[in-house]
Image (cartoon, grey):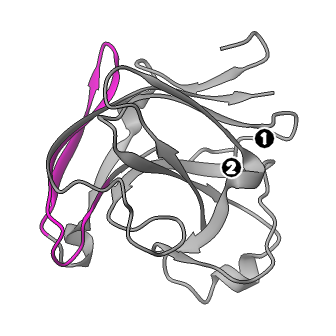
Amino acid sequence: MSNDNILIADSKDFSTWRMINDTIMGGSSEGICKLTSAGLSLEGTLIEENGGFVSCCSSLFAPPLDFTSFRGIQINIDGQGRTLKIAIACEGNFSRLTQFFSTGIRWVAEIETNKFGTTVAQIPFEAFLPTIRAKPVRFPLKFKSSSITQIQLLHSRFGTDGELNQGFKPGPFSILLRSISAYS
């Protein structure tokens, strides 16, 4: 991490993050997120039928984070070779559009992780794509880095394109999110 990075969350800051499993939509995956001295541990069992996702998300940032002077997000994660997603919620000038969707728009990018050790991934803001419930939004929208309201880590059977995630692995999992920062 360079000196121009700003830390968003690490082992001290993940205490307010909470779990969201596919059970909210009728699935049966089980997962917990818990704070450890090394970061945020996301553990459980992924069940593909009727869902196929687990996630952990931050509390709402109030006021929203303003990262206009940064290029993107850096994730330090032990992901067991899985393809994970980072989702970002933003306040924006398209609030009229989001009122038609119950879950709102999330800006999502995929992270392919190393099978062993820590993956350090830098994701430029322009790589985040607008989605609603794992389906791409085809409207011309612009990511608003000046108003980030929430960040979420997901492991889902669907990729950012709405197709199946080739890095999805049902069954037991253990992922360690070490830190998230904005990089310039």
Q: Which residue corresponds to mark 1?
A: 66
Predominant SS of the magenta segment: strand
Q: Residue 25 carries which label?
A: none
Whether residue 105 is visible to the viewer of this picture, yes or no, is: no
Q: Callout 2: few (<14), some (14-19), or many (20+) C-alpha neighbours within 10 Å? A: many
Q: Which residue is drawn at 50% across and 82% down?
A: 102
- In the image, is residue 44 part of the stretch drawn in magenta? yes
Image: 165 above or below 67: below
Label 2 secondary element: strand
Q: Outermost residue toward the right?
A: 69
- In the image, is residue 105 part of the stretch drawn in magenta? no
Whether residue 154 is visible to the viewer of this picture, yes or no, is: yes
Q: Which residue is drawn at 30% across and 56% down?
A: 168
- Quadrant of the snapshot with the N terminus: top right
| Image position, residue 71 (x, y; %) | 80, 37
Left or right, 139 with reference to 22: right
Q: Residue 148 carries which label?
A: 2
Magenta residues, start to end: 28-54
Label 1 secondary element: loop
| Image position, residue 89 (x, y; %) | 61, 58
| Image position, residue 149 (x, y; %) | 63, 51
